[in-house]
Image (spheres, grey):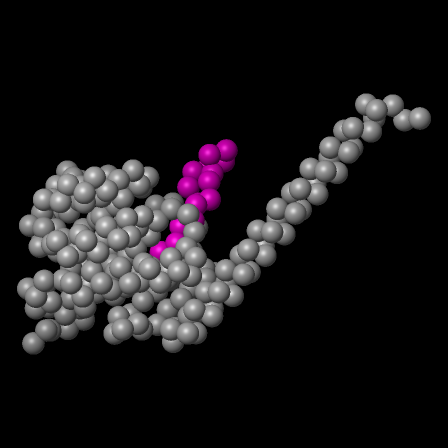
Amino acid sequence: MIPPQYIVPPLIFVVGAAIIASVTLATRWGCRKRRMALAAWAQKEGLYFSPERDDLMVNQFSDLKCFDHGRDRYAENVISGAWQGYGIQAFDYHFTSGYGRTETDHAFPALVVGAPARLKPLFIRPAGFRDKVAQTMGTEDIQFESAEFNRKFVVHAPDRKWAYDVLHPRAMELLLQTPSLAIEFSERSVIASRDGCFKVQDFAQALALVVGLLDLLPNYVMQQEVVGGDAS
């Protein structure tokens, strides 16, 4: 008879390997199901979907600070096209930070919508949202008349008056309906992102939020120079 001490270690190894294999298969199947769901949603909305890795796409968003970090940056599961008159790009963004033992891979979902007019920098993040972008704005938090909004969001902007004009009561109410998303305005676009993973309904919710905020921009903003041309 084989002593128990010679049986248990191999048995633990086999069980551990089986668990790892099961988790890997479940993860791959989950990713495949998500890609299929994203492709179906994109087709339904008249958008284009590509699951392939794109190393160049994020270069066009150099004015968005959330893409400033790390190296080996790329997008995958890209959804692009026009939606209600706005150009959109939704994707899973990946980058690497650190080197050697501290090297870490990061990923977060993002939705970028092209701006109808030239905007100004503005960053709105959920309270407690772990992101270095807020630190790069170089400005103090901006407080608003809504106590609930102040509890749930932290706002940074070099131009405080512009932030107050954009985040009027209707815009704040819209943000309070989806308090988990971080929003960044740049000159040419607006991005919604968050930690974790977007399901189809999350992309749809983020799209509705960003387009809703753009539709609620004050008239004076819309009368500024249109991106790529003159408003007149």
In which quarter of the view is residue 216 placed?
Answer: bottom left
| Prevailing secondary structure class for the magenta stretch in the rendered image | strand
- Residue at 42%, 61% in the rendered image: 200
Q: What x and y, as percent, mark residue 2? A: 90, 26
The quadrant of the image that shows the C terminus is: bottom left
210 relative to 149, above or below:
below
For this rendering, which residue is in front, 229 or 169? Answer: 169
For this rendering, which residue is in front, 170 or 207? Answer: 170
The quadrant of the image that shows the N terminus is: top right
Whether residue 229 sits left or right of residue 25 in the image: it is left
Residue 204 appears anywhere in the view? yes
Queried whether the magenta region covers residue 89, the answer comes back as no
In which quarter of the view is residue 143 placed?
Answer: top left
Q: What x and y, as percent, mark residue 14? A: 75, 38
Whether residue 228 sits left or right of residue 232 in the image: it is right
Q: What x and y, as percent, mark residue 203? A: 37, 60
Q: What x and y, as percent, mark residue 16? A: 69, 37
- Residue at 58%, 54% in the rendered image: 28
Specify the segment rendered in magenta: 96-110
- Residue at 17%, 52% in the rendered image: 172
